[in-house]
Image (cartoon, grey):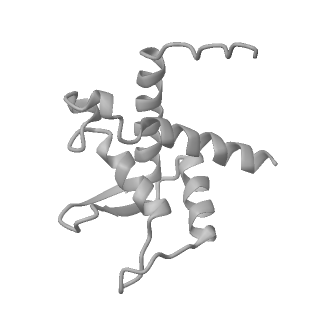
């Protein structure tokens, strides 16, 4: 239960910060800016493919990657763009720092959710 909660929190943060269209012209949030690493990490975790391009649905890989992200592990991983033209070597700790920074920046500029009106 505890581990599931931590993973859900990480997935929600990744979902909130990845590919924010309203920040398109802002270099910090652009595909070439600091948050690009989070997009590549999302693909590394959830969009794996085999040599023939078929989706690989490896739950063990997802759990391992999220656990290492949560622990800010210093292990290095290779993140690759979808077109294969860009590669980055980063640690899970690097990704964790980027995620926390982007999430806090997003929270600082957010508005509170509206309370639903009763029917």
In the displayed structure image, the side of residue 101 where residue 37 appears, left or right: left
x, y percentage for residue 106? 43, 24
Closer to us: 35 or 97: 35
In the displayed structure image, the side of residue 73 where residue 76 appears, left or right: left
x, y percentage for residue 87? 24, 62
Q: Report the residue at 40% width, 62% height from top.
A: 77
Q: Is residue 38 above or below residue 30?
A: below
In the displayed structure image, the side of residue 73 where residue 48 appears, left or right: left
Res 35 → quadrant? top left
x, y percentage for residue 107? 48, 21
Closer to us: 3 or 118: 118
x, y percentage for residue 52? 36, 86
Q: Report the residue at 36% width, 80% height from top.
A: 53
Q: Report the residue at 46% width, 75% height from top.
A: 55
Q: Is residue 46 above or below residue 23?
A: below
Q: Report the residue at 20% width, 61% height from top.
A: 86
Specify the quadrant that holds the C terminus: top right
Q: Furthest-bottom residue in view?
A: 52
């Amino acid at each position: 239960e505890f581990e599931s909660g931590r993973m859900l929190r990480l997935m929600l943060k990744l979902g909130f910060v990845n590919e924010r269209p309203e920040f398109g012209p802002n270099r910090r949030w652009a595909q070439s800016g600091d948050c690009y690493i989070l997009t590549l990490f999302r693909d590394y975790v959830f969009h794996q493919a085999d040599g023939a391009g078929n989706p690989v649905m490896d739950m063990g890989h997802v759990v391992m990657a999220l656990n290492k992200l949560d622990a800010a592990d210093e292990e290095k991983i290779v993140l690759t763009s979808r077109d294969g033209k860009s590669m980055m070597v980063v640690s899970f700790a690097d990704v964790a720092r980027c995620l926390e920074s982007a999430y806090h920046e997003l929270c600082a500029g957010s508005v509170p959710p509206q309370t639903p009106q009763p029917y």
